[in-house]
Image (cartoon, rainbow, N blue to C red):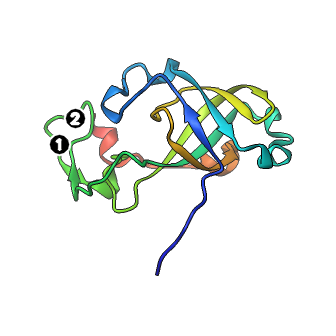
Amino acid sequence: MTITFTPIGHVRSPYDSPTDVDHDAVDETTGEIVLEDDYEDGLEGIDDFSHIVVFAHLDEIDDYRSTARPPHADDLEVGTFATRSPHRPNPLAQTTVELLERDGTTLHVKGLDLVDGTPVIDVKPYVGSIDDEDVSFGWLEDL
């Protein structure tokens, strides 16, 4: 089975490559999610949300790794699916960012951890009552 996605836009960010992403400063990183003009009507009402979830294709990642060493946990090695590592069989990203402003099809955001030019697959509003229910943080709780 083959699944095909068509990008709806791209990312503008200060990061030129995956190794440039500063995970310690990402909360303050600003950038833009720029959608194609065809999708402007689909953004109607998005301005009413404080945060959005961006789905993207990590087009610069070309290798799958079955395990990963999470940042800030150097002595820990866990399975890739138990991390947010980009090195996945299908390099998809999901990131929640603060929506600062909308200007036409450009969404100005804060908290961006994506590389400049990354293809955007979808954008959805972050809804706390749906996206932040009672959760467990697995191995992260031990850090």
Distance between the alpha carbons at the discs numbered 2 and 1: 5 Å
- From the top left corner, tell me how far across and down residue 75 is, in percent: 13, 38
Give me the residue at 57% from left, 62% from top: 5
User: Left of 101 or right of it: where is 83?
Assistant: left
- From the top left corner, tell me how far across and down residue 106 is, in percent: 72, 32
Q: Is 120 rendered above or below residue 31?
A: below
Give me the residue at 47% from left, 35% from top: 114
For disc 1, the neighbor class at 10 Å (few under 14, some 14 to 19, many from 20) is few
Q: How many marks?
A: 2
Under mark 2, the amino acid is Ala
Q: Which residue is mark 1?
A: 76
| Quadrant of the rendering where the C terminus is positioned | top left
Under mark 1, the amino acid is Leu
Label 2 with label 1: CB-CB less than 8 Å: yes
Disc on res. 34: none
Q: Which residue is mark 2?
A: 73
Give me the residue at 40% from left, 61% from top: 90
Question: Which residue occupies the foreground of this view, 109 or 76?
Answer: 109
Mark 1: secondary structure: loop
Question: Which residue occupies the foreground of this view, 126 or 116?
Answer: 116
- From the top left corner, tell me how far across and down residue 19 is, in percent: 30, 31
Give me the residue at 22% from left, 59% from top: 66
Q: Is 6 rendered above or below residue 36?
A: below
